[in-house]
Image (cartoon, coloured by chain):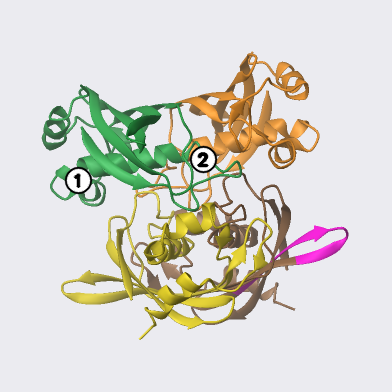
Chain colours: A yellow, B brown, C orange, D green
Amino acid sequence: VIRLAKHVRFEEVDAAGIVFFARYLNYCHEAMEHFFAGLDGGYVKLIRERHLGLPAVKAEVEYFSPLRYGDAFFIDTSIDHIGTTSCVLSYRIWREQADREIECAKIRHTCVVCSFPAVTKVAIPQDMRALMAAHPTR
Amino acid sequence: VIRLAKHVRFEEVDAAGIVFFARYLNYCHEAMEHFFAGLDGGYVKLIRERHLGLPAVKAEVEYFSPLRYGDAFFIDTSIDHIGTTSCVLSYRIWREQADREIECAKIRHTCVVCSFPAVTKVAIPQDMRALMAAHPTR
Amino acid sequence: VIRLAKHVRFEEVDAAGIVFFARYLNYCHEAMEHFFAGLDGGYVKLIRERHLGLPAVKAEVEYFSPLRYGDAFFIDTSIDHIGTTSCVLSYRIWREQADREIECAKIRHTCVVCSFPAVTKVAIPQDMRALMAAHPTR
Amino acid sequence: VIRLAKHVRFEEVDAAGIVFFARYLNYCHEAMEHFFAGLDGGYVKLIRERHLGLPAVKAEVEYFSPLRYGDAFFIDTSIDHIGTTSCVLSYRIWREQADREIECAKIRHTCVVCSFPAVTKVAIPQDMRALMAAHPTR
């Protein structure tokens, strides 16, 4: 599990005063970039120099408890599954309140490694595979 | 089915050149607001005057084909399920190319009707229920 | 003057409950794309096929009256100045209330026509120049 | 001067491949929140408990050099002017390349302290005034 600490930004809430439901996928992507920071050059080099990306084929979000402006929270990223060209990332979004852990959301994110700009599937490169294998969902 | 026509905006793509995966939920929310435009005062009055909202408890997105800047697309919204306090909206995102329909994404969006700011569950109001009942997923 | 009608979306407000100040530039860009829809293939073809863009060199926003979720508003786009490679677009954002026009914001947006991906200045193409010349700020 | 270090996120670029011009104001707001972190409870308490906010009355952005996905950059925030109810924040956005400082953008941001939700002007509270006075633009 690789953990990212964040807090809710001023413009991330909606007219109901809670974090907009789509934002959780922005948060996940940031956690994914943070996860792949362990690669040489990180996710940035993957995109800009290796011309590889991980377009989503599926995203399943369960929302448990709303987040509001200023709330501090954590995203724990781990790997549920590693296939030939695809992988499943798992994210747990939670915060602390009075020494208790509040579950906020849980996301399963299925990606396929693709070369860009053509968006064609390729086998998961060895360095990505090794990094993912080191962080399985418990 | 209620249809919304849109096109991809300049800032909706990511560094890989395709619509960012979280944006599809922004698109769905816009389609949901469009769906509920059939209520007196629409979704806006629901939020601003009736102090009701529909926070998501679940969102499942399947991505089939990427969208790029300028692509015209459609969102078809229909209702999969109506419960006591919760409902399931279904969205089909598709575009036309050479007289063929290209499936882009499919989303199931489970919401609970809540009163705000407390975010407490309430029974689905009668006007919302009637509107939803008129547009079942085929 | 070319006019675009819009309304404030659910996720465009901030934790203070009014449209986030950066969003006005998103609105302007949409108005600019709408303005250039008069070109063959519009702004989309400009970017995707002609590999030209209009990066901003300056943006000056004056905010007069806040916008809230659901507010309907208009953006009037006109051209303040046309240079060799640069131009100045002017946007007036306003809404109607009880038959009166409420000024919401005013933006001056200085752009330079550039070829991409190198981001090097080029002379304003003739079709863009003609379209802009037809819509001067009064 | 109070400095914030950031890097360009995956979804912050536009279809031309550079950071979308509106995003610079998102960056500034984050730098402003970071600046006011020096208050007891920070900007979050200001908004959520003291019901004060700083809506913009003016924002002037000059863009010097584009930012791309993954670029690391800095935002230096300082105070140009402190009035009775209004203040002017100044932001310098820059990055390092081969030991040189590249100027990316410069922003002047005029705000008025207001009480919410009514959005009525109030005198700048003493703690805000003191914090701002300690960080004048050189």
Q: Is residue D77 above or below residue B28?
A: above
Magenta-tinted stretch: B89-102
Magenta stretch encompasses residue B93: yes
Q: Are marks 1 and 2 on the same chain?
A: yes
The circle on residue D37 is 1
Discs 1, 2 touching: Cβ within 8 Å: no
Please state the horizontal and vertical placement of residue A71, each as a whole percent of the image: 28, 60
What is the secondary structure assignment of the residue under circle 2? loop
For residue A39, what is the image quadrant?
bottom left
Please state the horizontal and vertical placement of residue A85, each as a whole percent of the image: 59, 76
Amino acid type of the residue tagged 1 in the rendering? Ala
Magenta stretch encompasses residue B100: yes
Instruction: Say which residue label 2 marks.
Output: D20
For disc 2, the neighbor class at 10 Å (few under 14, some 14 to 19, many from 20) is: many
Nearer to me, A67 or A85:
A85
What is the number of callouts on the image? 2
Give the left or right position of residue B41, taking residue D48 as reference. right
